[in-house]
Amino acid sequence: MVLSRPCVSKPNGYWLKVLPAMAVVCVLSPLAHGAEPAADARGIEFFEKKIRPVLVEHCYECHSAKSKIVQGNLYLDSREGSRRGGDSGPAVVPAKGDESLILEALRHDSFEMPPKGKLPDAVIADFVKWIDLGAPDPREGAAPALKVVDIEAGRKFWSFQPPQRHSLPSVMNEAWTWTDIDRYVLAKLEEKSLRPAPDAERALLIRRLTFDLIGLPPTPEEIADFLADRSPLAVAKVVDRLLATPQFGERWGRHWLDVARYAESSGKERNVPYRMAWRYRDYVIDALNADMPYDQFIREQIAGDLLPADSTAERDRQLIATGFLAIGPQALTERVPEQFLLDVADEQLDATCRAFLASTAACARCHDHKFDPIPTTDYYGLIGIFRSTELLAGVQPLRREFSYARAAALGDEAQRLGPSRDLQTRIAKLERELDVCRNKVRDANKTKDPPQIELAKQAEAKTFAALTDLRSQAEGAEIRYAMAVRDVAQPVDYAVRIRGELDDLGPVVPRRFISVLTSERTRSVNRQHSGRLELAAWIASRDNPLTARVMVNRLWQHLFGTGLVESTDNFGLTGEKPSHPELLDYLSLRFMDEGWSIKRAIRTIVLSRVYQLSDQRDAAAYALDPGNRLLWRFGRRRLEAEAIRDAILFASGELDLRRPVNSETLKLPNLELGSTARLMAADDSLRCRGVYLPMLRNNVPGMLGLFDMADPSLVIGRREVTSVATQALYLMNSKFVMDQAKSLARRLLDEEPADVAARLELAYRRTLTRSPTAEEQRQVWEFVEQARANPSSKVAKSQVEIEAWANVCQALFGSAEFLYVH
């Protein structure tokens, strides 16, 4: 080795001391440099034999430059990509296994990769060893640039642009159209050289209208009146009559309750009853019956507690409306307070964005949204709003019961400061004492000392009895309580949680809305308050491109079975595009122009000729458009679970149209139910409408669940429709259906004791809303005659006739014609 001459002069003695040390370095350096390539070579060999094959087989499909969609912005097909990582952080950190997220994923700790199943422990151990070696990796080349959310580009997507006023399309068959809706639909059909189906028969039309608007069949008298009215306004008169009935709010309120994930218990592991949730249910029904403008409906549900009120009654109504934010599922077993509050805020954010905007913004909790132009900072800007909101739901983590002291007080100030408030204070005190007693019981059990255990249990029982007594006294005062929300005393902006981890903090994000949908003038939030008032105003604004479109699409979907946008709850990039975009814009603008009136929007749609078409099939049209997206005919669809149940009760004469004064859940113990609680044999004995049945998470009424009731823990704008054997078996064998068939049979015999033909006519009118055909008359007559001639030995002679007609009625209840709207 040749040493260069020092550039700085030093004393002679200095070099005498330094040169020996340098000589040692010179001697050792060849060994050092020779060892490193050998180690690298072994590491590279290990990578090639043990690591690369696993990456290629299990990871490259989703995490390489050749992937169709790169999951999580993570590229594992290059050294740079692996070490840079993706949305959640670096996948590989050389020599630092505890910081290498790939090991978490392989172990299925916080991530689960591969998603199809955990790899063998030996493979995971190989990855640990490789990273401990320094993660030697010979792969060269730069990884593709990380995807960056482009807000401006995102604003070009159709649903993020304001609805436009389009010129009405020209059509060749002008005479066919009745309304502007018809012109938009016919123009699309004519483009494809298709013709619409014939108009529906009038008897089918009144059945369709009555079920769609109030969820019940028409009476024989209503059918007769409609068939006799040949005036051009006959349909409009039926529509106006139905829109004015209280049953309209019950029918369409149930549609909204699906979206609002309405339920009367917390769900999840500790299923505590929500004893005041029914107030929100009744609020929704009343709002729809009163035709409350939809923009006001939005404001009250998000920020009703912050709106001005002219009376105590108005204040109470607006406070109850915020139950929308309080009735979601809650994990009451969560022991970390901030995690619980963050999870509640996340659920509120998700419900708000999906319900009103059909947006999956909550998917940006751990990283930027994978598809929509929503950065994670937007998510935490919204989370700050909900985290600055206090839940008054009557429940609390680690408690097993509902407490009125933790609900929202209704009524005027004098009421809230009167005896009821004192009672709730005493209840809250006893609840704290009961917690102490339970802790003492747990401690005593550890001692295994029977006398000590018995004393602790006696103290717990005494306290629980006193608490139960006070709660019974509170039952009379519960009318003054509701589930609601309010602003916290000190609103806060919230810091980004890296990868969604509670303690891994990123920058603090000022409270704000979704950037792709906002302008500078709509982003400001009053820092002294939560921001819910501004959020409600922003969502309910004409300037928001999604709000009117989403609601109009929901209305269309409930009337036609499928929305103009098929993905009802997703108007983002992964959702479906509208089949008739100009029609959607037309309806959205008209909806807002007419004061956000839901009733007027529904009336406009059902008076169109498109809505009044038959479901007659045309071979050519079906071949071109089997999904009926061009609306060449009316789409036959099955009734919802509640409508099937209510129609059976209505036909039998046992449906009670009165609204219950509260909820059946108040009869339940005020304790956690558990996921397998035996509840409500009363479901089949109740005669109220289905919308008023107890709606407990994990315990949906049996018949409703069987016929595809919406999951009350999720925002559901469109229910699944299944056809399974258990549904047919239920209609054949359930006590509820058999009892109602017998009730209808008695009713028929009472009303038509002698005239069998008239009795059969009435049976068909009450169930299928039409007259029986000659063939059906013959078949029923033969069946009844056979039943009379050969009665079952199990049936008393006096009951033979009733039993025969009950079988006829049950067959009608189970028919496809009864279960479907045509």
Image (spheres, rainbow, N blue to C red):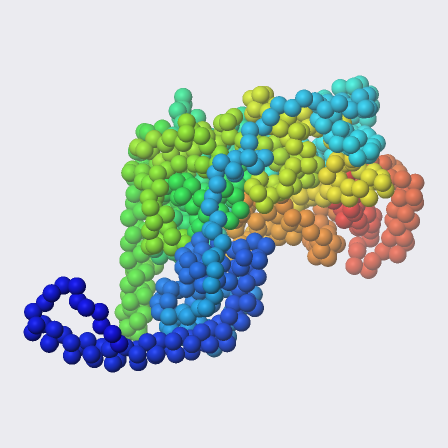
Say if 5 sits above or below 765 in the image.
below
- Seen from the viewer's position, the closer of residues 274 and 560 is 560
- Seen from the viewer's position, the closer of residues 347 and 707 is 347
Percent position of residue 636, x then y = 76, 41
Say if 176 sits above or below 773 in the image.
above
Residue 664 visible here: no
Percent position of residue 531, x then y = 38, 34
Residue 452 visible here: yes
- Give the quadrant of residue 474: top left
Percent position of residue 88, x then y = 42, 55
Kindly identify the residue that appears in the image at 78 percent across and 44 percent down: 626
Percent position of residue 433, x then y = 28, 54
Q: Name the side, left or right, on which 551 lies relative to 238.
A: left
- Seen from the viewer's position, the closer of residues 617 and 13 is 13
Q: Name the side, left or right, on which 570 lies relative to 421.
A: right
Q: Name the side, left or right, on which 190 lies relative to 402.
A: right
